[in-house]
Amino acid sequence: MKDWLPFTRPLLDEETIATVAAVLRSGQLASGPQVLAFEAALAEYLGGARSVRALTSATEGLEIALLACGVGPGDEVIVPAMSFAASANVIVRAGATPVFVDVELLTRNLDVAQVERAITPRTQAIMPVHFSGLAADLEALLAIAARHRLRIVEDAAHAIGTRHRGRPIGSFGDVAVFSFHPNKNMTSIEGGAIATADAALVERIERHRFHGIRRNADGEIDVELAGAKSNLSDVAAAVGLGQLRHLDEFNARRRTLAARYFERLADFDRLVLPARGDDGHSWHMFTVLIDFAARGTTRPEFQRAMATHGIGVGMHYPCIPGMSFYRQLGFRADDYPNAARIGRETVTLPLFPSMRDEDVDRVVAALRAELD
Ligand SMILES: *Cc1c(COP(=O)(O)O)cnc(C)c1O
């Protein structure tokens, strides 16, 4: 369709595309100078006090962060019941048990009051998700973690460029993991990064990232653990470097578009708007709730109706405990009422930096036409 408006679309400049061509001609394609430069640029973006290690994805980054924190069989990790499935899958892959906690309906972030109640002697870590780029209540979570001697592994997949009380997510706290999937606020095609100030953790992350290999001063190798193979390519890192230069401008544009949705939808009571947050919100996604059952319709039907207007809407995310794998482990979506409701009712409206103001108006007009 000519005028198709997807819910998201990456934006790459010609300079980045030219740099990629140069990297492809350089003969250095795997992890090399571009990866080092990307890691350094990310560290600088985060204020200079953190080490950053790039990886092939946030999923790999989260799994490796957990393993590097010593999470394994017999351990529990607290995670929101509504997030992308990767947030919980990595806990299972690390051999540990996810302990789901419900989210707040409007922020979609962990309900901190319920976190402390979910802690047991087996709890090793808490994995907050900064949903849609709205920072979770990190002060409260860090205080809980300090009290119970837990690690906090932030799933910051939505939160590159998010600021919390003036500081970028990933510039404070324990361990934060970003995603550079093409749907996220910046991309390295596929890719992710871990940021932490814990030097011992960085060493272990490097081992897990590349075959468990450590080189001595003479370049001889030893293998210290059965590591993964999760290093980023220089081609991907070059894309990431080009994107990072635009990140703040991308996120500013996202904030402007989100503000326009709020303005245009303020009087429209057929859907529930998300929490507005503050200026630190990076607006990775604009998600609204629609009570399809009460309207006698379904989300797929609504998605098809929006498609007739040339508009793509997403669905982020179903309640994780309601997925068949987690049901088989004994979890039930109904135990997490907000997550279950969000899972049923959420739709993601188009929001990306190259969207025009008129595109927002077009989405709002289609919503009014379909939901009135
Ligand atoms: C996208 C996403 C991930 C995984 O990121 P990848 O880089 O695609 O592995 C993890 N958690 C959340 C909340 C995400 O949205």
Image (spheres, helix red, strand yellow):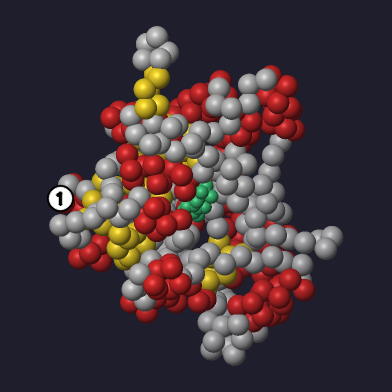
Q: Residue furthest right?
A: 2
Q: Residue at x 40, y 58 (%)?
A: 88
Q: Height in image: 341 above or below 158?
A: below
Which residue is more in the foreground, 65 or 305? Answer: 65
Which residue is more in the foreground, 46 or 39? Answer: 39
Q: Residue at x 23, y 51 (%)?
A: 124
Residue 232, how many percent across, how many down? 54, 33
Q: Height in image: 332 above or below 359?
A: below
Q: Quadrant of the C terminus?
A: bottom right
Classify mark 1: helix, strand or loop.
helix
Q: Residue furthest top?
A: 218
Q: Looking at the image, can residue 56 be seen? A: yes
Q: Quadrant of the N terminus?
A: bottom right
Q: Quadrant of residue 237?
A: top right
Which residue is more in the foreground, 307 or 149? Answer: 149
Q: Is residue 126 left or right of residue 220?
A: left
Q: Residue at x 40, y 26 (%)?
A: 213
Q: Is residue 357 left or right of residue 153?
A: right
Q: Amino acid at mark 1?
A: Arg
Residue 337, how many percent across, how many down? 37, 77
Disc 1: residue Cβ within 8 A of ligand 1's nearest atom: no
Q: Which residue is mark 1?
A: 147
Residue 200, how many percent across, how many down? 28, 30
Residue neighbourhood size for the residue with mark 1, other residues' Cα within 10 Å, grouped as few (<14), some (14–19), many (≥20): few
How many marks do you count on the picture?
Answer: 1
Q: Looking at the image, can residue 273 be seen? A: no
Which residue is more in the foreground, 333 or 131? Answer: 333
Residue 144, how many percent across, how many down? 20, 53
Q: Height in image: 259 above or below 308?
A: above
Q: Residue at x 39, y 53 (%)?
A: 93
